[in-house]
Amino acid sequence: MPAPDAHYAWKSVMAEPTRLDRGNVAVVIPALNERLRIREVASEALQHIDHVIVVDDGSDDGTSDCVRDLPVTLLRHSRRMGKGQSLRDGFAEAARMGMQAVATMDGDGQHKASDLPRLIAAANRHPGALVVGARLKKRASQPWYRRIGNDFGDWGISWGCGYRVVDTQSGQRLYPRAVFTLPDVPGEGFVFEAQMLMSASRQAGAGVVAVPVEARYASAEQEFRKSHFRLFRDLYNITSHTVKFILARGDVVREYRVTRAHPPVIDQDA
């Protein structure tokens, strides 16, 4: 694989990058009514990462009670504020703790905590990059409507980044400190995660690297709560936000050509 600077116009965000490990990376888990799986998710994350931050977004099903006795940092909103604010609060807590990176996982159990060391390893191979756990393994198991939303989102958000990204809707990511501490990143709900990718590129000069992972979906053997993602509503919100971002940059045709000329970076060694 060519060096990042030969593939993208990204720059290293640290002259001498700190090597990431389980002690200087925090896991942030935004949680809204996740009683079914949150204890399992947090417990499995603790097997791989020392610092786990659970942000309960005003749940009314006892989500906080499920993890209160675990060695995690528990933040709780008195009312629902959205996934974007939950992530912001988790990022702020990780920054206060002096963490060098933040890994994110959804609280529904879709992501495997065993993939966290792979994301960290990829981040160490690509210093300064934002790492996405891209759901490329056994993709046929993903609901068809989610695949449609993901493909459309990838096309538009990549345009906003200036290079192609795969699985821009994945909630399993690893953000370097220069990215998760970016100030005043706009967007609420799922829009915030889209904007984080674009801000990583445009403000922090960071690249995005995909690590193939396998996500878990509801089946006869596994029960998960219904996804909070609503295809038409959330895709419309993400699309309208991204279009405004792209138009504000100007010269949209040139930006599109540049984007298509830079294929996604997929770390197959992870």
Image (tube, helix red, strand yellow):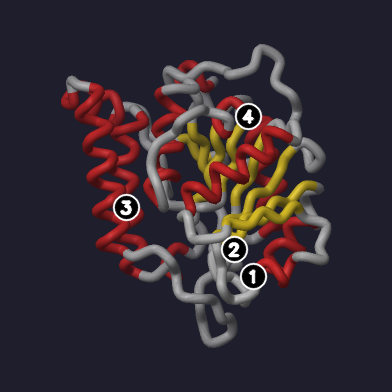
Q: Are marks 2 and 1 in contact (CB under 8 Å)?
A: yes
User: Relative to residue 83, is residue 122 depicted above or below?
Assistant: above
Residue 28 location, x and y as percent?
64, 49
Task: Give the residue pinned by disc 4.
Answer: 177
Other residues around mark 3 within 10 Å, as few (<14) / some (14–19) / many (≥20): some
Residue 241 location, x and y as percent?
28, 41
Q: What is the CA distance from the residue labelled 3 to the residue labelled 1?
A: 32 Å
Instruction: Name the residue: 74% across, 31% down.
Output: 98
Q: Quadrant of the C terminus?
A: top right
Inspect the image, locate mark 1, and give the three-letter code of the amino acid beneath it.
Thr
Disc nearer the start of the sequence (2/3): 2
Q: What is the CA distance from the residue labelled 4 to the residue labelled 1?
A: 28 Å
Inspect the image, locate mark 3, and give the three-letter code of the amino acid beneath it.
Asp
Disc nearer the start of the sequence (3/4): 3
Disc nearer the start of the sequence (2/1): 1
- Give the SS element for disc 4: helix
Instruction: Name the residue: 69% across, 51% down.
Output: 53
